[in-house]
Structure formats: C-alpha cells, structure tokens
Amino acid sequence: EAQVTQNPRYLITVTGKKLTVTCSQNMNHEYMSWYRQDPGLGLRQIYYSMNVEVTDKGDVPEGYKVSRKEKRNFPLILESPSPNQTSLYFCASSPGLAGIYEQYFGPGTRLTVT
Amino acid sequence: GDSVTQMEGPVTLSEEAFLTINCTYTATGYPSLFWYVQYPGEGLQLLLKATKADDKGSNKGFEATYRKETTSFHLEKGSVQVSDSAVYFCALRDNDMRFGAGTRLTVKP
C-alpha cells in the first residue's frame, strides 16, 4: 500500500530535550516536506526537500532541522524543543515540485512540549 | 506571495443540506488548486483538484471550478451526509504549496 508513515503519533516531552520525528514514504517520491498545523493558521511549511541531500527552508524553519540521506526518509529534528513548538506535525511527499502534483500526507504527530 | 483565503467556519448543516465553502486565492503564476479533507485523527487526503482555469474537479459528490476571473475555487456539494463531517482545506500549488486556514464542517442527522 502506498503510504507516508510517521512516528511517533503522539509525543509529550520537556523543554530542551532533543527529539526526532521520523517520516518515511514508499512511493519513490522525490519531494518531501514537513508542515505544522495550528488552529486558525492552516498548515505552514517548515522544511522541504527536492531530492536526496537537497533541503530548503519553508515559512517557519526556526528551531527545526531536517536531513535527507535516503530518498524514502525525511526526519524532523528538534534540537531544543520549546513550548511554542507544541503543535500537530505532518510529513508529506509528492512525485515532484510542480504544481500539478498532489501531496500525500502522513497521519500526523501530535507534539506537546511542557 | 501566493496565499489562500477560505471561509473559516465552523459550518453546521443538517443532513441533505447544500454545502458551499468559499475559497479565494492570490497568485502571481498559474497554480493548481486543491481541496483536501481531514477526518478526525487523520492526515489530509486529496478530495479534488483542478490544474488550469475553467477546470472542474469532482469527487464523492463534491465539486469545485477553477475560476481565474474571480480567483476562486469554491467547494460545493448538493446533499451532505453525516460522514462528510471533517475539516476542509483549500490549497494552491505553484512551486510552493499554500493552504487556507481550514473550515470545520459538522453535519447533523
């Protein structure tokens, strides 16, 4: 089954404790991205990657890191989480960057930072 | 930059009522337009899309027409069901993807 998987689905952590949210897709997609969803703000892009070893900042990259060492995986790293990073996070992938392509979304990771 | 504005809601309807969720956009290029749906506890799923002006996207009884003259992509359904209760996101994609704030729809029996 074609899908995007994320782990964990739920995470509660404390300020400053490094964490990683994993994302994997099995569709051989070149483009992957991370979003955060906050009430009233829709989805805002954090980082995206157009291919292996190619990553770039989205609209809200502060406090986040990513890497793309393999085509299928695109982990999101919070080196020192803070309470304002409490949010619902989605990973997405698509065949390419062009506008005609839809994005396929993972199930989401709900992060709480206390 | 490109942006999407959609009716914020929440919207509450009775079963079999007509649904319209308004969406307008601003873009410098020629984006594709999308409606995504998010059911409780799940990620976003593509509902329909249109890639050029005057295209109509349709799926599961939902429709939206890409109107370049009014920069709109309103979502419509003639008769909603309880199972349509979800959050609906309008989005555009040129090189970047932009989402609206989302509209929560609740359909009551």
Image (tube, helix red, strand yellow):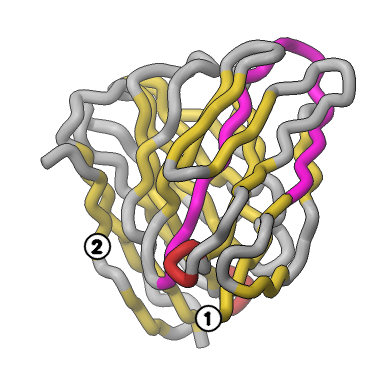
Rendering coords of residue B54 (x, y %): 69, 14
Whether the magenta-drawn stretch holds residue B38 is answered as yes
Range shown magenta = B21-40
Please report the residue visible at 15 percent of the width from the left and 35 percent of the height from the top: A26
Vertical order, B38 against A4 (above or below): below
Q: Is residue A30 left or right of residue B100?
A: left
B79 or A35, which lies in front? B79
Q: Which secondary structure type mostly characterizes the magenta part of the structure?
A: strand
Amino acid residing under circle 2: Asn
The secondary structure type at the circle numbered 2 is strand
Where is the N terminus of chain B found, in terms of image quarters?
top right
**How many neighbours does mark 2 have within 10 angstroms: few (below 14), some (14-19), or many (20 or more)?**
some
Q: Is residue A20 left or right of residue A38?
A: left
Name the image quarter holding residue B96: top right
* Label ID, residue B54: none
Label disc, if present, on residue A7 of the rendered structure: 2
Where's residue A47, x and y in %?
51, 40
Q: Looking at the image, which is closer to me, A109 or B52?
A: B52
Identified at 34% across, 67% down, the residue is A19
- For the question of whether residue B72 can be seen, the reply is yes
3D distance between C-alphas at marks 2 and 1: 36 Å
Callouts 2 and 1 in the same chain: no
Q: Residue beneath label 1, please?
A: B109
